[in-house]
Image (cartoon, rainbow, N blue to C red):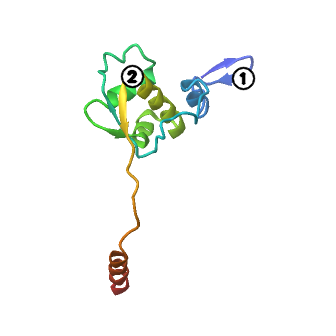
């Protein structure tokens, strides 16, 4: 922290400025329908991503050889989920990562199964 014009100025820009700067003000559009449970895997090496901005390189590094969810990436990077979705979407478009969104249930549960669960809960 240092003083400038009588005000104390911190090197930390705050919790909202960094995500805005990292995504260059972009959010919410054309995000490949990414969910917090969407798994991301790197298909390019860390070396191939070395020319990218630091956050992009870090995502590629974290996703080498093992899938990580959007939520896990946000935790590792200490960024908002919305910012990570923008960054991952950029990396998908550039071919550095691939993704797999969670599958949604296709139908309703069997009534007999639901009844068995309900009966089991009632016995507790």
Secondary structure, mark 1, is: strand
Q: Which mark is residue 29?
A: none
Q: Which mark is residue 57?
A: 2
> Is 107 above or below relative to 24?
below
Residue most toward the left?
Answer: 65
Q: Which mark is residue 7?
A: 1
Q: Position of residue 86 (x, y in %)?
A: 51, 31
Residue most toward the right?
Answer: 5
Secondary structure, mark 2, is: helix
- Marks 1 and 2, the one that precedes in the sequence: 1
Q: Give left or right: position of 54 versus 7.
A: left
Q: Residue at x 33, y 75 (%)?
A: 113
Q: Depth check: give the residue in front, 32 or 4.
A: 32
Q: Residues within 10 Å of mark 2 (few under 14, many from 20)?
A: some
Q: Give left or right: position of 44 versus 88.
A: left
Q: Give left or right: position of 26 versus 104.
A: right
Q: Residue at x 67, y 24 (%)?
A: 8
Q: Depth check: give the residue in front, 41 or 32.
A: 32
> Is 107 above or below relative to 99?
below
Between marks 1 and 2 in the image, the one whose residue lies nearer the viewer:
2
Q: Residue at x 32, y 81 (%)?
A: 120
Q: Position of residue 21 (x, y in %)?
A: 58, 24
Residue most toward the bottom?
Answer: 123
Q: Residue at x 44, y 25 (%)?
A: 93
Q: Give left or right: position of 19 versus 91.
A: right
Q: Depth check: give the residue in front, 103 or 13.
A: 103
Q: Quadrant of the N terminus?
A: top right
Q: Position of residue 124 (x, y in %)?
A: 34, 83
Residue most toward the front?
Answer: 107
Which quadrant would residue 30 be assigned to in this image? top right
| Disc 1 to disc 2: CB gap under 8 Å | no
Calculate the distance from the C-alpha at mark 1 to the C-alpha at mark 2: 35 Å
């Amino acid at each position: 922290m240092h003083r400038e014009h009588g005000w104390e100025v911190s090197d930390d820009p705050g919790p909202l400025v960094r995500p805005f700067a990292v995504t260059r003000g972009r959010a919410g559009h054309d995000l490949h329908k990414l969910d917090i449970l969407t798994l991301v895997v790197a298909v390019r090496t860390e070396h191939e991503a070395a020319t990218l901005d630091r956050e992009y390189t870090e995502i590629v590094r974290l996703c080498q050889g093992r899938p990580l969810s959007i939520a896990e990436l946000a935790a590792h990077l200490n960024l908002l989920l919305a910012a990570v979705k923008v960054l991952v979407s950029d990396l998908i478009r550039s071919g550095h990562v691939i993704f797999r969104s969670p599958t949604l249930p296709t139908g309703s549960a069997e009534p007999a199964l639901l009844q068995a669960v309900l009966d089991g809960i009632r016995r507790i």
